[in-house]
Image (tube, rainbow, N blue to C red):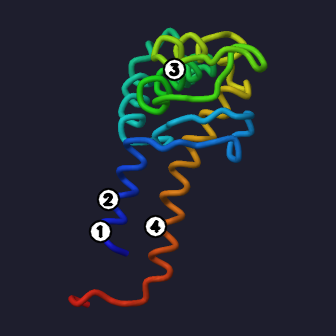
Amino acid sequence: MSLDMYEAEATRALDGAWVGPAIHKLDKVQFRVRAWANPEFITLRDRLMASVPRDKRTPDGDIPADEVHRIHTECLLQTVLLDWRGLEATKNGPPVVYTADKARELLTHPKIGSAFSPFRQAIVASATQVAKEGREQLEEEIKNSNEPSAGA
């Protein structure tokens, strides 16, 4: 495995990649996303989870599902979703241009942004794919690399 391959995969995970309908099943829509659970995602998620006040937690100290959903939405908006193309307001209608404000509007919409909505699931699936492709490529390279380094 070459160092430039490691660097390329890290760049893809952090700078984002375009993912299309073959992964997420939304006709014609592509998302440019960073890898799910990228370092910025982890940092923000941990900070937001830690900031949930005790009175918003369950008696066991757990964070309720609606609060976790809110935190994951914020993480998607700030650290994962970078752009989209092919998203239409109505079937064969005008395109919905990506802006951070439009992404926030859609991901906080009670139906479009709900945990089980196809739109939200497509974004998560796309980000998961970016992370998975990086891991799979690295694992394949390592598996196929039989040559020890000169220092071995």
Quadrant in which the C terminus appears: bottom left
Rounded to the nearest whole Å, what is the CA distance between mark 3 and mark 1? Answer: 34 Å
Sequence order check: which comes first, mark 1 or mark 4? 1
Rounded to the nearest whole Å, what is the CA distance between mark 1 and mark 4? Answer: 11 Å
Vertically, is 35 above or below 76? below
Q: Mark 2–mark 1 contact, CB under 8 Å?
A: yes
Which numbered tag is attached to residue 98?
3
Q: Mark 1–mark 4 contact, CB under 8 Å?
A: no
Please tell me which residue lies in front, 12 or 43.
12
- The kind of residue tagged 4 is Leu
Vertically, is 70 above or below 139? above
- Dot 2: what SS? helix
Sequence order check: which comes first, mark 3 or mark 4? 3
* Residue on which disc 4 sits: 138
- The kind of residue tagged 2 is Glu
Rounded to the nearest whole Å, what is the CA distance between mark 2 and mark 1? Answer: 6 Å
Q: Mark 2–mark 4 contact, CB under 8 Å?
A: no
- The kind of residue tagged 3 is Tyr
Rounded to the nearest whole Å, what is the CA distance between mark 3 and mark 2? Answer: 28 Å
* Residue on which disc 2 sits: 7
State the image quarter where residue 148 is shown: bottom left
In the figure, is residue 137 to the left or right of 116?
A: left
Q: x%, y% of residue 84?
A: 55, 29
Q: x%, y% of residue 80?
A: 47, 33
- Dot 1: what SS? helix
Q: Nearer the viewer, mark 3 or mark 4?
A: 3
Tell me what residue is drawn at x 44 percent, y 41 percent: 16
* Residue on which disc 1 sits: 3
